[in-house]
Image: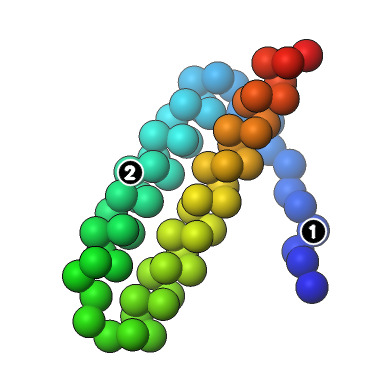
Amino acid sequence: MEDDPMMIELTEPEHSLLVTLLEGRQRELLHEISKADVHEFRRGLQEKEGLLESLLVKLATQVAGSRAR
């Protein structure tokens, strides 16, 4: 069962900052994943990284769609 989507309107500077913050956290998570020894811990980090990647794709899609208008 998928959660209901939430909407948020961002200005260009807000969008840029959010992307920068998410990309930074994604890099940190990838580093943590490479160092993780415990399988369950690594799996949790991988799930978080997957969510971050999904958010970044959605943000990129939103920007591309708004520029096409």
Residue at horizontal 50%, vertical 51%? 53
In the image, residue 49 sits, relative to residue 57, either above or below, namely below
Q: Position of residue 12 (x, y in %)?
A: 55, 19
Is residue 60 rendered to the left or right of residue 38?
right
In the image, residue 19 sits, relative to residue 45, either above or below, namely above
Mark 1 or mark 2, earlier in chain:
1
Q: Give SS at disc 2.
A: helix
In the image, residue 55 sits, relative to residue 37, either above or below, namely above
Q: Which mark is residue 25?
A: none
Q: Amino acid at mark 2?
A: Gly
The residue nearer to you, when weighing 45 against 18, is: 45
Residue at horizontal 57%, vertical 51%? 54
Q: Position of residue 62 (x, y in %)?
A: 67, 31
Residue at horizontal 39%, vertical 42%? 23
For disc 1, the marked residue is 4
Tag 1 near tag 2, CB within 8 Å:
no
Q: Quadrant of residue 37?
A: bottom left
Residue at horizontal 53%, vertical 42%? 56
Q: Give SS at disc 1.
A: loop
For disc 2, the marked residue is 24
In the rendered view of the protein, which quadrant contains the N terminus?
A: bottom right
Q: Amino acid at mark 1?
A: Asp
Q: Position of residue 68 (x, y in %)?
A: 73, 16
Q: Position of residue 64 (x, y in %)?
A: 65, 24
Label 1 crowd (10 A; few <14 / some 14-19 / many >=20): few
Is residue 52 rendered to the left or right of residue 8?
left
Count of numbered marks: 2
The residue nearer to you, when weighing 11 against 34, is: 34
Q: Quadrant of residue 39?
A: bottom left
* Scheme of colours in the image: rainbow
